[in-house]
Image: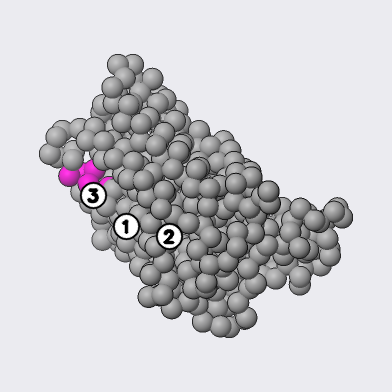
Amino acid sequence: MTAATITAAPTRARRRVLGYLGALAFLTYLDRACLAAIKPAVMDDLHLTMDQMSMVFSAFVLAYGVFEIPTGHWGDRIGRRRVLARIVAWWSTCTIATAGAFSYASLLVIRFLFGAGEAGAFPNATAAIARWFPVTEQGMAQGMLFASAHFGAAVTPLIVGGLLHVVSWRLLLVAFGAFGFIWVCAWWRWFRDDPAAHPDVDAAELALIAADRVAPAPAGTAGPRLLAVLANRSLLLLCLVYAANGYGFYFLITWLPDYLKGFHHFSPLELQLYAGLPLLLSVPADLFGGRLTDALARRYGLRMGRTLVGCIGYILAGAAVVGSTCCTSPVAAVVLFSIGAACSMATLGATWSTCTSIGGATTGTVGAVMNSASQIGAFCSPLVTTFIFKRYGDMTMQIYVIGALYVVAAVAWLFIDARAPALTPRTADPVARQD
């Protein structure tokens, strides 16, 4: 049975799942980007240097990368309901704990623990999508997930900028952390790992969800052998692609305001607007890219549907980002840079949907491997930014590095095959159009 043969009007419980996961993604980036938004106040209060602040940012990513694969594997073993509840409760606790930082060392330790606790959020959310959505809706669902995340990161500077006039940065972190515990309570009460076990899912929706989907692993079984997973060429190339994406994205949420202020000389008020523009444009780009990759997959098959969006998206991203350095108008430069960043984010629906196709019943582990590669790029990004700034006096060279990495990602997409599972023999493309 395929999704096209489902004729009865199904219930829409999977949309509510997407609502919960979208809220999770929003809170993830709200809490993650908050430190960058309050960076001047924190650096002044704790007497931190630029090097120390870069190490604080990188400590989060280092821990996130180290614990990503174990947490993804854990989710494959015990289910997404328990693991995601633990993740959100942990990072919310660490958000509140950040408010109590009293020195460079204390902030470094708290951010490391923050990264360790948040690790595995997106691989497990992706695995939940793979469990609750048919193949031909997964790009759309991934687009919605990352649109929520990028919207959270985009509005964080505006929210923080407004609230810092009335509350301290410490009280702000306590308030942000409290929202996570509200999410945990609601998620635990409603969500079930198996759609068939949920009372809000009728037979028609269950048939739609199950169409063209890889069967879940039996409860309690081990995840895939890591060496066997790493032997998959498409997964290795996805890791390369996602490392490039992580490198560029982390620049957006760490040092982009400093680049705009130093190179384009924007005022503080203009910075609040333009620093969030790349992520604001990423929201419609995420939605468009997710729907486009599903449409192309239905029309031309999984491989072409995912590869076209990934390859073209990164070509446009590299050209726009590098081209922004040639603009004489500061506003034109930041708009072009933002368009480039949005093009890179439009590929995320294709990237994570390919991950679910490759991972199958062990998407949590496979997604964690890919996301760990992103953290390598994210870890390097602020450190390289600081090195470039000290060497050249500005951050323009970092823009060239980001553009070059996007071109590398575009080339890598040409060799990625979404039909090649990490651990099972290749099967026929289930959503290719029958001619």
Which mark is first along the chain, 2 or 3?
2
- Residue that label 2 marks: 234
Q: Is residue 12 above or below residue 221?
A: above
Q: Quadrant of residue 240?
A: bottom left
Question: Which residue sits furthest top?
Answer: 328
Which corner quadrant holds the N terminus?
A: bottom right
> Which residue type does callout 3 highlight?
Leu
User: What residue is drawn where x is 48% and y is 56%?
Assistant: 417
Q: Is residue 125 above or below residue 219?
A: above
Pointer 2 local density, CA inside 10 Å: few below 14, some 14–19, many at least 20: many
Q: Which mark is residue 255?
A: none
Q: Which residues are magenta?
A: 382-387
Question: Which residue sits furthest right?
Answer: 8
421 left or right, relative to 241: right
Q: Is 383 part of what is drawn in magenta?
A: yes
> Which residue type does callout 2 highlight?
Ser
- Residue that label 1 marks: 376
Its colouring scheme is: one colour
Pointer 1 local density, CA inside 10 Å: few below 14, some 14–19, many at least 20: many
Q: Is residue 430 above or below residue 144?
A: below
From mark 1 to mark 2, how far is it between C-alphas? 18 Å
- Residue that label 3 marks: 383
